[in-house]
Amino acid sequence: MPMVRVWNRNSVVHKETFKGDEIVIQPGKFIMMDFNEANDFRGQFFTPKFNKGGAQTIDSMKYIEIDKNDYKAALDELNSRGEDRAKKTYVCMKCNKEFSSKRALLTHVKNTHSDELADDETREELDAELEGA
Ligand SMILES: [Zn+2]
């Protein structure tokens, strides 16, 4: 998982137990966290405390923000990993070449292996599939 900056936007130090560890972030500073961990940490419930007047104490306020640029970069990275995986889905049975789409594979088979295809019927099936792809 990509790493992201996790900011404490509060004016006091943020201390919170997360998955058994004490997380400490100085006011206005950040720590690096794994993308998924950062999302879990930001969403974890932080018990509010109240002073005698009934107002929430500032140290119990959670002003945690995942850096917007890092968040976007992490999403882009995760998405492109998914695309890399999908690219290997279509493999030519004749020569093991990999293609990013069914259409690209069928075009390749038609252009490269047409002569090796068993008969005209198979060729026609290929043409029909290519039109639908
Ligand atoms: Zn091939």
Image (cartoon, rainbow, N blue to C red):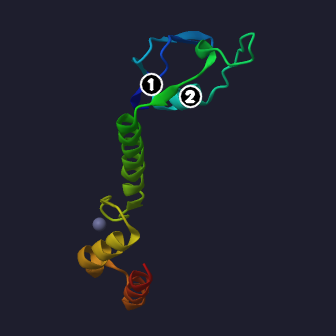
Q: Which residue is mark 2?
A: 42
Judged from the image, the secondary structure of the residue bearing numbered disc 1 is strand
Q: Which mark is residue 6?
A: 1
Residue 102 occupies quadrant: bottom left
Amino acid type, residue under disc 2 in the picture: Arg
Would you say residue 125 is visible in this rendering?
yes
Residue found at the far left of this picture: 112
Q: Quadrant for the C terminus, please.
A: bottom left
Judged from the image, the secondary structure of the residue bearing numbered disc 2 is helix
Q: Nearer the viewer, residue 49 or 74?
A: 49
Q: Quadrant for the N terminus, please.
A: top left
**Label 2 neighbour load within 10 Å: few <14, some 14-19, many 20+:** some
Residue 117 occupies quadrant: bottom left
Would you say residue 17 is visible in this rendering?
no
Whether 120 is drawn above or below 27: the answer is below
Which residue is painted at 47% across and 16% down in the image? 11
Quarter, ligand 1: bottom left
Look at the numbered disc 1 and say if its residue's Cβ is closer than 8 Å to ligand 1: no
N-terminal label among 1 and 2 = 1
**How far across and how far down the image is residue 74, in percent?**
39, 38
Label 1 and label 2: CA atoms lie apart by: 8 Å
Q: Is residue 46 left or right of residue 9?
A: right
**Label 1 neighbour load within 10 Å: few <14, some 14-19, many 20+:** many
